[in-house]
Image (cartoon, helix red, strand yellow):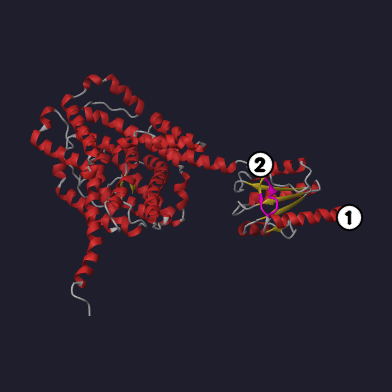
Amino acid sequence: MPLQGEGGAARRLLLRPLLDDLFAGLTVAGVLLPEAVAYAAIANVPPAHALLGALVGLCLYPWFGSSRFAIVSPTSSAAAVFASAVALGGVPMGLALVMLTGVLFLLAWALRAEFLGAFVSRPVLRGFAWALALTIILRQVPHLAGMPVSAPGFFPLLEQLWHYRALVHGPSLVWGLVALLCWGLFKRLHRWLLVPPSLLILVAGIVASQLLAPAQDGVALVGAIEWNWAGWPWPRLADAYWLRAAEIAPALLVILFAESWGSVRTLALQHGDRVAPRRELLGLGLANLASGALQGLPVGAGFSASSANEAAGGRSKLTGLAAALALALLLWQGRDWLALLPVPVLAAVVIGILAHSLWPRTVLHSLRLRSDASLAWVAAAAVLVFGVLFGLLLAVALSVLLVLRRFARPLWSELGQLPGTRDYLDRKAHPETLRMPGITVLRPEEPVFFANAERIFAGMREHALASGTQVLVLSMELCDTLDSSSVEALAELAQDLGHHGCTLMLARVKDRSREALQRAGLLDGSAGQLVPVFWSVDDAVQAAQQRLNCLAGDLV
């Protein structure tokens, strides 16, 4: 029989996680509200489009995604790409881009293509993000200063701002600078604040606008936020615009997935959670497809909102649903209040949200790592010089070219036996290793495939023949599989070495590669050349020594 009070304690234990998720949901809604309004300004559309995108992402992702911390909503990079599409073909083209991106996410999910996010290297993504933040902040300067200035690129806008500096609107600039000063103060006091600084500035700006009527001094306001449901409208676009949107969608998919997976994986590692990239593709695909159909912005798991969820104590996916409920109430009842928000204050909120990205510490840290880090500056320069859209495409192209360049290089090394062991190591890195007379052990340092097979095997052939090798042992441990071009190149290598009195042996061949060699007839000699295969390098070397001993005995 349970003791008195045990039932109440159990109920409190059950209610505590629920209350934590609800409170975290309210906190997330407080973060998403100013971000949604700010990202709508970046996308050059009314705030309702960003709020709708956030609502769709918050409602759909918890049912299909794998992370309990991820908050799927519009992001700054996605909003900037949406703005580029709007500049090309209006809002319908932007919505078409969102829907096509959602379709591509679902196609990638169906094809199990969760590796797509890995094709954007971190230095390229960091350079793109830094230049994007700088571009977005510069675009807010005319709104902050009340200047009727606009230009499509970073440097043309910078030139116009300097040329028309006399057009600065004093009252607008005062509102914007006061908001920025408040942002700096609130950021210093954020540990003692119960709500995010951006939300405080947003509310303060609306209240001040109601009391001081800045519109009478010529300060621009956000204005009426209207969204009339008209079913599921299909974007009416010419075929050329659909094709252009289809060209942009793959790049947006890769950037969104790389950004989202980075956020999801980082938070999962901090808490020992397990997340599934394929489920992320499904959740993001359905969210973007529905967001585009409902006239919302593209969405992804942004790091700021997801981190706010984790920091606020969210424990389950219920947090996203609670945040969606709060935003829905705002969209239903709070649009008249948002209409009073001064545009300079909104611009200050955008600048404040992205200000932490201005100092390129992550880019500078990447440079210290060398290797491909210089690509960060190339991606940043592309965004600043050619615009966000071309910078996005170039960032993806640079990452893919980096992968192709790395795998296409004919890298291989010679191995030697570590004295007293059966281990074989790189002779350049370990000079103490031994080389057996007449036997050369080589290893490809990259997976062998059609783009590098001929050059790798040609270099190995020259090295073996130049060193008087009688038996060449290839360690194939880095090759998970061999395509037809690689198998043919390997058969040609064995045949060519045989003509020069050198025998080819293979070691550490994985099962799928072994099956490819078997189908090609290299393991049974049906292709005209028998290639012995061994499970370890040491077994292959011992067999090679026995072969050389037999040859020496025959000569005697």
Label 1 crowd bin: few (<14), some (14–19), many (20+), radius 10 Å: few
User: Does 293 lie within the magenta span?
Assistant: no
| Residue 286: x %, y % from top left | 34, 54
Is 131 situated above or below 253? above
Residue topped by disc 1: 554
Residue at 40%, 51% (x, y): give it: 265
Q: Nearer the viewer, residue 493 or 86?
A: 493
Residue where numbered disc 2 is placed: 428
Amino acid type, mark 1 = Asp
Q: Is residue 329 left or right of residue 540?
A: left
Q: Nearer the viewer, residue 551 or 497?
A: 551
Q: Residue 48, image x and y in percent?
A: 22, 45
**Position of the N terminus by quadrant:** bottom left
Q: Is residue 16 visible?
A: yes
Tell me the distance, in whole angstroms, between the alpha carbons under discs 2 and 1: 35 Å
Numbered tag placed on residue 452 in the rendering: none
Q: Residue 218 placed where, x, y %?
A: 14, 28
